[in-house]
Image (cartoon, rainbow, N blue to C red):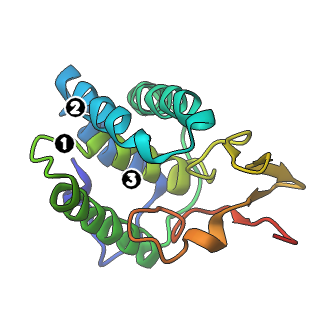
C-alpha cells in the first residue's frame, strides 16, 4: 500500500497511514536521498550562512532518520487522522513538488523523503515537522511547553507555497 491507495471515503487509521508511508519508503533508493540532499544543499544558498550547515545536517539526518523510523516503526497507534487535513497536506505537498520542479528545474528531484518526513511526524507521531530545538534567525527555536509545540515562524510562512506550516501541528510562538 502507498499513499494513493488510502481510502479517503472512510476513516483512516494512523496505522493505515503508517503502512502507506512504509510502502512509500520501500520504493526509495539511495539515489532518491542523494538527489534530495543535493537539491537541499544547492538551495541552502538562500539561507543565512550562519544556519546553512546546521540546516543541511538537520534536514539530511531528518530524511534518513524518518525513513529508518518509518520502516522500523512497529508501534500500534491509537486513533484516526483527520482525512480533510491529510488530504490538504497531500495536495500541498504535490503542489510543492510541482513548484520546486518548475522553480529549480529539477526533474530528477526526489520528493518522497520530504513527503514521508512531513506526513509521518505530523499525522502519525503528532509532532511538528521541524523538531524541537530547530533554530531560526534571531535566536528563536521550535519548542514544547505543556505538550504544545511552538514555532517562531509559523505565522510568517503560513501562506508560503513551499512551506509545510499550513498543516504542521506547531502553533505560532506567542508574542512574535
Give residue 39's position: percent from left, percent from top: 28, 37
* Camera-side mark, 3 or 1: 1
* Camera-side mark, 2 or 3: 2
Foreground residue, 81 or 107? Answer: 107
| Proximity of marks 3 and 1: CB atoms separated by less than 8 Å | no
For the residues marked 1 and 2, what is the alpha-carbon distance in whole angstroms? 6 Å
Q: Please, what secondary structure does the residue beneath circle 3 have?
A: helix
Residue bearing the label numbered 2: 35
Q: Residue at x 73, y 60 (%)?
A: 152
Give residue 169's position: percent from left, percent from top: 63, 63
| Proximity of marks 1 and 2: CB atoms separated by less than 8 Å | yes
Q: Please, what secondary structure does the residue beneath circle 2 have?
A: helix
Residue bearing the label numbered 1: 109
Residue bearing the label numbered 3: 17
The earlier-in-sequence mark between 3 and 1 is 3
For residue 34, side relative to residue 130 (left or right): left
Instruction: Classify 108 as above or below 89.
Output: above
Amino acid at each position: 500500500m502507498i499513499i494513493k491507495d488510502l481510502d479517503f471515503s472512510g476513516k483512516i487509521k494512523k496505522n493505515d497511514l503508517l503502512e502507506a508511508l512504509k510502502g512509500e519508503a520501500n520504493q526509495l533508493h539511495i539515489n532518491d536521498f542523494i538527489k534530495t540532499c543535493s537539491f537541499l544543499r544547492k538551495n541552502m544558498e538562500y539561507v543565512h550562512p550562519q544556519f546553512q550547515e546546521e540546516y543541511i545536517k538537520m534536514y539530511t539526518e531528518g530524511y534518513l532518520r524518518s525513513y529508518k523510523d518509518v520502516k522500523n516503526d512497529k508501534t500500534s497507534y491509537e486513533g484516526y487522522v483527520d482525512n480533510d487535513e491529510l488530504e490538504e497536506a497531500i495536495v500541498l505537498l504535490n503542489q510543492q513538488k510541482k513548484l520546486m520542479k518548475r522553480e529549480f528545474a529539477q526533474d530528477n528531484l526526489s520528493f518522497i523523503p520530504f513527503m514521508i518526513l512531513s506526513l509521518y511526524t505530523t499525522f502519525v507521531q503528532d509532532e511538528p515537522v521541524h523538531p524541537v530545538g530547530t533554530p531560526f534567525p534571531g535566536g528563536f527555536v521550535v519548542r514544547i511547553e505543556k505538550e504544545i509545540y511552538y514555532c517562531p515562524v509559523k505565522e510568517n510562512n503560513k501562506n508560503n507555497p513551499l512551506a509545510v506550516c499550513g498543516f504542521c501541528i506547531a502553533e505560532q510562538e506567542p508574542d512574535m
